[in-house]
Image (tube, rainbow, N blue to C red):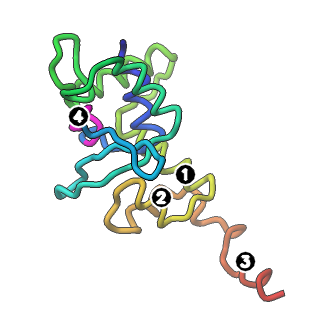
């Protein structure tokens, strides 16, 4: 089965870095308190368990089939996909979809973080999802941070009224 849907889901729905997705092994998948999770190695070697959205779980299960060991993503020869392989996959999908803009695996991560902020997910939660050590990094993705409509003064006035 093609790794495409599973890889794209991890990059877009979970906002994983390409190195986190490509560095994962099948054995890193698990269940914790009723949630399907993937243990990934973040920057600076931090190991974290990230919950997987149901569409991601479905894509991974379809892709893995009965495979229970080895790298999570492999090429046709069974070798671990690297970030260059993943970038080629993203470019191929973009071309097939008629997207002329240069897309990279980081473009998908950027989309995940931006859309989570647009959806109103609290900054702290998006920071945790993205594995950002500093909230200022996450804030750079917030397209609406300059919006006066979202200014805290309105929320405070409504709370005090």
3D distance between C-alphas at marks 2 and 3 = 21 Å
Which numbered circle lies on residue 25?
A: 4
Residue at x 48%, y 47% (from the top left corner): 34
3D distance between C-alphas at marks 4 and 3 = 45 Å
Q: Are marks 4 and 1 in contact (CB under 8 Å)?
A: no
Local crowd size for mark 2, using a 10 Å CA cut-off: few (<14), some (14–19), many (≥20): many
Q: Are marks 4 and 2 in contact (CB under 8 Å)?
A: no
User: Magenta part of the protein: which range?
Assistant: 20-26
| Badge 4 element | loop
Q: Is residue 145 above or below residue 95?
A: below
Which numbered circle lies on residue 116?
A: 1
Q: Nearer the viewer, residue 34 or 3?
A: 34
Work out whether mark 4 precedes mark 1 in sequence or the reverse, and give the earlier one: 4
Residue 151 horizontal/vertical position (percent): 67, 74
| Badge 3 element | helix
Answer with left or right where residue 11 lies relative to residue 120.
left
Q: Nearer the viewer, residue 106 or 73?
A: 73
Which numbered circle lies on residue 155?
A: 3
């Amino acid at each position: 089965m093609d790794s495409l849907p599973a890889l794209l889901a991890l990059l877009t729905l979970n906002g994983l870095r390409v190195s986190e997705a490509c560095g994962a092994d099948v054995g890193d998948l698990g269940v914790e308190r009723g949630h399907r999770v993937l243990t990934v190695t973040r920057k600076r070697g931090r190991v974290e368990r990230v919950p997987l959205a149901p569409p991601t779980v479905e894509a991974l299960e379809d892709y893995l089939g009965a495979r229970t060991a080895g790298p999570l993503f492999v090429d046709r020869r069974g070798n671990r996909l690297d970030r260059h392989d993943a970038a080629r996959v993203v470019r191929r999908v973009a071309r097939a979809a008629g997207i002329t803009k240069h897309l990279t695996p980081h473009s998908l991560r950027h989309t995940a973080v931006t859309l989570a902020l647009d959806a109103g997910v609290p900054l702290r939660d998006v920071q945790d999802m993205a594995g950002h050590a500093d909230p200022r990094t996450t804030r750079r993705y917030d397209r609406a941070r300059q919006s006066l409509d979202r200014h805290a003064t309105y929320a405070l006035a409504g709370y005090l009224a």
